Image (cartoon, rainbow, N blue to C red):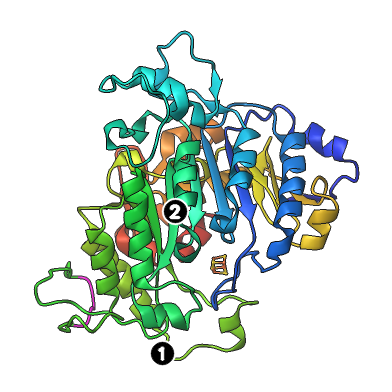
């Protein structure tokens, strides 16, 4: 990777990013009420700086965004749900969005739309079931249920249960936000407390029910396995062992809420669309790194927890990426698929990463630096063709469908099978890689050692 000195002049940077036509953008909101013990993200208190931060991020977006209608926008953090409604309105107003697919035939609809237009007026023209001439939308009006599949743009906001309420969620829905990613992490109160989360299991469930009542169909939750005190077992009534698992055979009672299975069972019962699973890793600069927690499941147990989750969640949810499950293909995260498909995207805000015109960049993680100049404090790397190939393989294997050999061969003018014959043959024989219609993918046991396998592919 060739590191280049960040240009001093913002104009030079703008020139390098010009005409990227990227259709995805990530926006980082770094504010949190309290630091979770495991958190290595760029997040902090300083809530009194929110207003100034929005001004700086607005400046950054206005300067670099080229106006191409987006098909995904992701507002993550930190805790974006700490923000007042007016800030979301401001951020959404800065972008154009792609025309929803089902509206494509409408000649009078503009090429780029603001998502809230769909709800406030134009949406009603396309809703065959709606006869009322009243064009205002209220979330509790069930006669105006929204089919979110009409949205070409996927607009996600990350929510933490303790900081979201009916006013915020209703406002987001009315603005056209059509996907929520909720930081649940566990449905065990003791575990939540021990990792420094501010919500309870009940609060998490209540916020999911509230969002569903308001009309959000595309709800994702984050869960973490391998947390301190978390256990794994198998209920006698549940068959989760596919023969390769080394799971403990334990009967779980209602009180044993620290069992990973219980969290998964609750998740499965909530009629949500998407689940993201993460294994706990103790990273530097975290509270857990300074003071390691007791009763931490070891790597083998973490692997069992992952394997258990895959078996337990399927077939209701299918694993479509190493860490992500969706109820149906409609709920695959379009924003993340763009990352895994090596697509272009903007990153706005402190620490945000982007990929434009073959340049990977990351904004400074230093809040003071970002606030002083949100335009030029970026680390840039121009990728070589070899690095692009490495990335394509690395990201492609994250997807359950795996890599598409024909596409890779065409894009990089290589013979994949010849170049990687030895590695592929070895891992097929050990059962960690399998052949697919279009190429290869990791098996579940391959996913468990994916770092090892993928490191062998890197040039
Ligand atoms: S809420 Fe998320 S970003 Fe904030 S401290 Fe906790 S883990 Fe980190």
Q: Earlier in the sequence, mark 1 or mark 2?
A: 2
> Is residue 214 magenta-colored?
no
For label 2, the residue is 181
At numbered mark 1, what does the secondary structure look like: helix, strand or loop?
A: loop
Judged left or right of residue 220, residue 269 is: left
Viewer-proximal residue among 219 and 89: 89
- Numbered range of the magenta stretch: 244-248
Judged left or right of residue 130, residue 418 is: right
Give x and y (percent) for residue 30.
64, 60
Viewer-proximal residue among 1 and 278: 278
For label 1, the residue is 295
In the image, is residue 333 above or below residue 249?
A: above
At numbered mark 2, what does the secondary structure look like: helix, strand or loop?
A: strand
Give x and y (percent) for residue 148.
36, 35
In the image, is residue 268 above or below residue 400?
A: below
Give x and y (percent) for residue 262.
25, 73
Give the alpha-carbon distance from disc 1 to disc 2, as whole Å: 29 Å
Q: Which numbered marker is on residue 210?
A: none
For the residues carrying marks 1 and 2, which lies nearer the camera in this image? 2
Judged left or right of residue 131, residue 407 is: right
């Amino acid at each position: 990777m060739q590191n280049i000195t960040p240009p001093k002049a913002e104009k030079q940077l703008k020139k390098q990013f010009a005409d990227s036509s990227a259709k995805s953008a990530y926006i980082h909101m770094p504010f949190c009420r309290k630091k979770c013990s495991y958190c290595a993200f760029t997040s902090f208190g300083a809530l009194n700086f929110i207003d100034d931060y929005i001004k700086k991020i607005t400046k950054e977006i206005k300067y670099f965004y080229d106006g191409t209608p987006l098909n995904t926008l992701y507002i993550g953090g930190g805790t974006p749900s700490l923000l007042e409604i007016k800030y979301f309105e401001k951020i959404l107003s800065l972008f154009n969005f792609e025309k929803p697919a089902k509206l494509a035939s409408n000649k009078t609809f503009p090429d780029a739309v603001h998502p809230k237009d769909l709800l406030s007026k134009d949406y009603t023209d396309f809703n065959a079931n709606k006869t009322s001439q009243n064009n205002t939308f209220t979330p509790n009006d069930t006669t105006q249920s929204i089919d979110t599949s009409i949205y070409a743009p996927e607009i996600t906001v990350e929510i933490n249960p303790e900081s979201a309420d009916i006013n915020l969620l209703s406002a987001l829905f009315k603005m056209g936000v059509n996907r929520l990613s909720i930081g649940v992490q566990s449905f065990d109160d003791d575990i939540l407390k021990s990792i420094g989360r501010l919500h309870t299991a009940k609060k998490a469930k209540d916020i999911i029910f509230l969002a569903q009542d308001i009309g959000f169909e595309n709800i994702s939750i984050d869960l973490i396995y391998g947390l301190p005190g978390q256990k794994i077992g198998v209920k006698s009534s549940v068959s989760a062992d596919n023969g390769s698992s080394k799971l403990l055979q334990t009967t779980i009672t209602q009180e044993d809420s620290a069992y990973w299975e219980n969290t998964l069972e609750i998740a499965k019962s909530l009629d949500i669309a998407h689940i993201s699973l993460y294994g706990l890793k103790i990273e530097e600069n975290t509270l857990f790194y300074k003071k390691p927690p007791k009763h931490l499941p070891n790597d083998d147990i973490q692997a069992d927890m992952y394997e258990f989750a895959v078996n337990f969640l399927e077939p209701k949810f299918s694993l479509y990426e190493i860490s992500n499950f969706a109820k149906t293909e409609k709920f695959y995260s379009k924003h993340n698929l763009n990352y895994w498909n090596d697509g272009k995207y903007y990153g706005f805000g402190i620490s945000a990463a982007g990929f434009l015109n073959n340049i990977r960049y990351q904004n400074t993680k230093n809040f003071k630096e970002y606030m002083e100049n949100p335009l030029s404090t970026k680390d840039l790397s121009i990728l070589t063709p070899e690095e692009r190939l490495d990335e394509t393989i690395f990201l492609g294997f994250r997807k359950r469908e795996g890599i598409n050999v024909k596409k890779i061969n065409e894009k990089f003018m290589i013979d994949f099978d010849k170049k990687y014959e030895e590695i592929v043959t070895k891992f097929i024989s050990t059962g960690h890689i399998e052949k697919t219609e279009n190429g290869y993918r990791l098996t579940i046991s391959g996913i468990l050692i994916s770092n090892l396998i993928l490191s062998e592919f890197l040039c």
